[in-house]
Amino acid sequence: MGKLEGPVEVTNFIEDISQQYEKVHEAFEDNFWSTKMNLAGCSSEALAKTKTEYDRPDLSSEQSKVLSIMARTLSCYITEDPRAAQLKEELNRLEAELAQERNKMALGIKDPATGEFKACSSVQLRNMMRVDDAEPSRRAAFDALRSIGPFVAARFCAIVKARNELARLSGYEDFYDMKVTAAEGFGKKRLFEILDDLEGKTRPINQEARERLAAEKGAEALEAHNISHSLAGDTTKLTDPYFPFEDAVDVW
């Protein structure tokens, strides 16, 4: 970070906290999948000092901006309620167990032509829905993707309950409200107001596009297992000569 204008002691504080946070966050990222939402090292004291420094009248505009960002960042990770801390630990365990079980799932399709089971990743299945010309294969891929839901439902519901309890202990309506507030600076109520307005304004355009697609390719083009192929199939074919898959590894 370059030297900021304003009181030297404030700049020194910012640099010190930044260095500490960088070390903590790097360790967090290294273990991200097993330690979600458990960014240890942030403290109420650091947040309080950040806010105190932020209220000083002699700060430069740059210092004010950096301190406000720090205050918002630290507030996302501080857990003072013992029950909230316990829930975070429980969530780490539940999420790790869910990931482990999901990795064990025998995901794939029953080949419509041969009846044989073919193992496929979720990425492969989505690609099949987009580019496979055979509708039975697209349907099989769609059904395979849908099978993930029932497989993870019980464990995921337990995670949702724990997440919502954690969020309510922190003063939010639910976990989604907490995450939206942390990411956007406003809650889910405001987000839904924005999205409702967007949906209302784009609904006629979407309806017209769906009607045009059905008129051009038939009503079945709107089916869940067909629509991505109906929208992207032609484009993929046209671009294939320019982006051949056989050259992908060499290009990468």
Image (tube, rainbow, N blue to C red):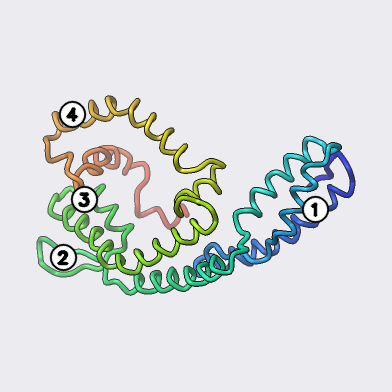
Residue placed under numbered mark 3 in the picture: 132
Comes first in the chain, label 1 or label 4:
1
Would you say 51 lies left or right of 202 here?
Answer: right
Q: How many marks?
A: 4
**Amino acid at the residue labelled 2:** Lys
Q: Residues within 10 Å of mark 4 (few under 14, many from 20)?
A: some
Q: Note whether 104 is above or below 226 in the view shown.
A: below
Q: Residues within 10 Å of mark 1 (few under 14, many from 20)?
A: some
Separation of residues labelled 1 and 3 (CA atoms):
54 Å
Residue placed under numbered mark 1 in the picture: 15
Q: Nearer the viewer, residue 233 or 197?
A: 197
Circle 3: element type: loop
Circle 1: element type: helix
Comes first in the chain, label 3 or label 4:
3
Separation of residues labelled 3 and 2 (CA atoms):
15 Å
Tag 3 near tag 4, CB within 8 Å? no
Comes first in the chain, label 2 or label 1:
1
Tag 3 near tag 2, CB within 8 Å? no
**Amino acid at the residue labelled 1:** Glu
Separation of residues labelled 3 and 4 (CA atoms):
23 Å
Q: Residue at x 78, y 42 (%)?
A: 55
Residue 129: % across, % down: 24, 50
Comes first in the chain, label 1 or label 3:
1
**Amino acid at the residue labelled 4:** Glu
Residue placed under numbered mark 2 in the picture: 110
Q: Residue at x 53, y 71 (%)?
A: 86
State the mark number for residue 211. 4
Q: Residue at x 41, y 74 (%)?
A: 97
Depth check, mark 2 against mark 1: the one in front is 1
